[in-house]
Image (cartoon, rainbow, N blue to C red):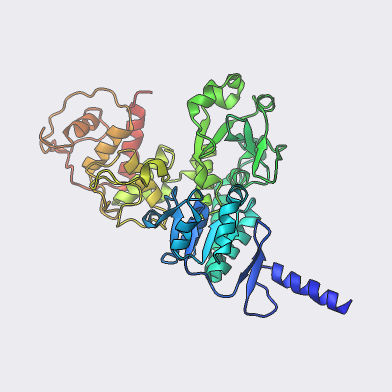
Amino acid sequence: MKKRILSVFALILFLAPGINASGRTKGFIDRSGNKIVIEIPFKRIISLYGAHSENLFSHGLDEEITGVSKNEAYPPRATKKPVFSYHDDAEKFIASHPDLILIRPMIARGYANLVLKLQRAGITVVSLQPRTVDEMYSYWKKLGMLTGKEREAGEMIKEFKAGLKRIDLFIKGIPSSSKKKVYFEAIHSKMKTFSPSSIAIFALKTAGGINIADDAQARRETNIAAYGKEHILSHAEEIDVYLAQRGAMNHAKVRRIKEEGGFSAIKAVREGKVYILDEKIVSRPTMRLLDGIYEIGRILYPSRFNDITPFMAKPVVTRARFAEMLIKTMNIRLKTPDYRHDIRKRASAEEHKYGDFKDVDYAGNGYKFIETAVYRGFFPNISKCEFHPDMPIKKGTVAYALFMNFDLPDARPVAIKDVPKTNPLFNQIQAVVGLDIIKLNKDGRFMPESSVSGREVFKYISLARDKSVH
């Protein structure tokens, strides 16, 4: 009896992540039910899931990551890594001498022979994929154990929870009666939503939304739940906002949702409140889930999540701050890296692709607004690798951005002393001046190279919005 108690105690020690009887090895049970023993950190890692790769980089790894899946797009460093696929032969993996290959349950179930060959070759294969936010914290810790980055994993959790507290301040004080009711689509063709315990619904609720499909039942231990058109339409008049994730399993488009038979009865569809979100920021267990929550918040409560008050007192606005002011003021959806376009072999050596700017911090916050503004074509003459985020925004660039963003009516011609017709921005400047969005000085000059203040930027954007063709 005593021996049996000791055996059970030893098993508990092994199963508890980070706890072990010897003090030398660590271990846990992965999603395939395999006992994973960690004697020393793994140093040559192939990741076959974008979330794994992203989290490894967030843990501070780089050289240790020796391979990623073909769809990797964030962080930009991931695009430089060798590409592997679960469709590849085991020999390709073995030839690269990894000591750890990270997969997820889908791969473990669908490609069991590949996994078996890799294990027989002496490679540790670990299947991980959290289904809830609590599991996500444990998952980050397990990645830290595997790679010797437990402290970094702990810091990630602290940083994520601090981010949740900041977001909570945005929705604090919203009466329950004023909170938006939302249907969150997972797979349109099958009329599926997310299970109430899923990461996506956590994101929705954290942003202050009410899940209209809170009675959805998950199937086969997944985050996806069948709901059915009839069930959706039974809530038609309650749905204030219709969200849909776009990803490999759901090629969502606003038009398709609006044209779905019977969906004209849905309040959100009638009122044009249908929005598409990238699954990489609303369903994946990474730090960018904070971006997804923030983006949902910008949709549901734009006045709270798009506050630009801190910029108003700036005597000089930088290019980075201008990008953020424009994106927030106009509530433009944030651009995220799209592997179909952003990590394909670069056809033009001079063309900027997401992540190319060497002077932009892609681990920070401002890059999201910069890349979105560049993607939307709001900055002229963008070089491939430099954005100059800290340089003052020029008045000529502001004129160009306003012209590109707003559908402005024809403007009266105006003589501008310091902007000749040979100026590359002549048409854009002529338009904003002719519509009295930006006025000339007393000498009849525009001064396209001059800087602008936060209040001026806000004034120009507001006037352009008022003048635009609706």
Of 392 and 352, the residue lying toward us = 352
Whether residue 271 appears in this view of the structure is no
Image x and y of residue 6, in percent: 81, 77
* Image vertical order of residue 176 relative to residue 43, above or below: above
* Left or right: 413, with 91 as reference point: left
Q: At 26% from the left edge and 48% from the top edge, which residue is drawn?
A: 393
* Left or right: 78, with 141 as reference point: left
* Image vertical order of residue 61 relative to residue 285, above or below: below
Image quadrant holding the C terminus, namely top left
Image x and y of residue 325, in percent: 37, 44
Image x and y of residue 67, in percent: 44, 58
Q: Quadrant of residue 33?
A: bottom right
Image x and y of residue 22, in percent: 67, 80
Report the number of numbered marks: 0
* Left or right: 245, with 323 as reference point: right
Image quadrant holding the N terminus, namely bottom right
Residue farthest right in this picture: 1
Q: At 54% from the left edge and 71% from the top edge, which residue is drawn?
A: 151
* Image vertical order of residue 244 relative to residue 467, above or below: below
Q: Quadrant of residue 326?
A: top left
Of 207 and 148, the residue lying toward us = 148
Of 432 and 205, the residue lying toward us = 205
Whether residue 384 appears in this view of the structure is yes
Q: At 55% from the left edge and 25% from the top edge, which residue is drawn?
A: 269
